[in-house]
Image: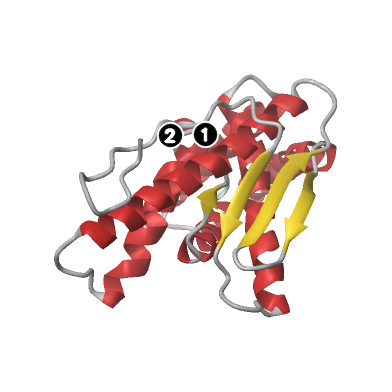
Amino acid sequence: MISDGRGDMPTRPKVPATGVSLLRLVIDLGEAPPAHELIGTVRALTHLYEIGLLAGAAAGGSRFRDDALTLQRIGERVRSDDAAAGSPLGTGQAQRLEVARRRYERSANEIVWAAPLRIQSLAVQRPLDIALTYRAVTAPVRGYGAAALGGIGATVLSVQVHHQRQEAQLEPVPEEARDGLLRGAAEDGFWQSFGHEARGLIVAADREKLGRSLLFLARRRPRLA
């Protein structure tokens, strides 16, 4: 059982099973949330879900994993050669990197398009009550969708524990450190479902967008319904 913050310190939650087909969340957007808060929440959840799809594919055997590994290896080789030579990319290196990047993007898009996130129900009263599912009907994409919802669930549990621990502390956390700690807790919760290697196979731009979406959601104190 997770502590309510008034008694014993909470322990780290167990990650939800990855075979999730429906995830229901309660999110505090305040009284009469404006449209931009609702849109931002759905956008953040969608981005978490889509990166979860890719992380699930990267954690197992898939063409996306192969293309992500190829992009990673070529990128590392190019950076190493560039650092050693102290010169910009040669034409051949640039072409290989661009081909690998396009293959990565094509594989990623095929997975995202095959398993779109779906809002099964939405109640806008305070707090926001939202149920998420997905449309994938074929394996292995169906499994990626289940893993992605599981990743969101693990994120929410980790954020709940973080808030409870902060409330249980005698001294408040300085405001300038609060967001960093909150984002770190959300990222730990998300990535523990997929593993360190899967995290490294997602391109840096998507990891940064994911971090911003995690922080947006974490600030609004989500919890599992």
Asked if labels 1 and 2 touch by Cβ distance under 8 angstroms, the answer is yes
Mark 2 Cα within 10 Å, few/some/many (few <14, many 20+)?
few
Residue displayed at 58% across by 35% down: 150
Say which of 113 and 46 sits in front. 46
**Residue 138: quadrant of the picture:** top right
Quadrant in which the N terminus is drawn: top left
Could you tell me if residue 83 is visible in this image? no
Amino acid type shown at disc 2 = His
Residue marked by disc 1: 198
Amino acid type shown at disc 1 = Ala
Left or right of 69 on screen, residue 38: right
Residue 84 numbered mark, or none: none
Vertical comparison of 220 with 101: above or below: below
Position in image of residue 103 (x %, y %): 74, 39
Label count reads: 2
Give how far apart the Cα atoms at labels 2 and 1 are.
Answer: 6 Å
Residue displayed at 49% across by 46% down: 155
Residue displayed at 54% across by 41% down: 153
Mark 1 Cα within 10 Å, few/some/many (few <14, many 20+)?
many
Vertical comparison of 202 with 144: above or below: below
Position in image of residue 61 (x %, y %): 64, 19
Say which of 107 and 187 sits in front. 187
Could you tell me if residue 13 is visible in this image? yes
Helix, strand or loop under label 1:
helix
Left or right of 194 on screen, residue 12: left
Say which of 29 and 4 sits in front. 4
Residue marked by disc 2: 196
Position in image of residue 202 (x %, y %): 57, 43
Position in image of residue 51 (x %, y %): 62, 45
Residue displayed at 28% across by 38% down: 11
Say which of 50 and 151 sits in front. 151
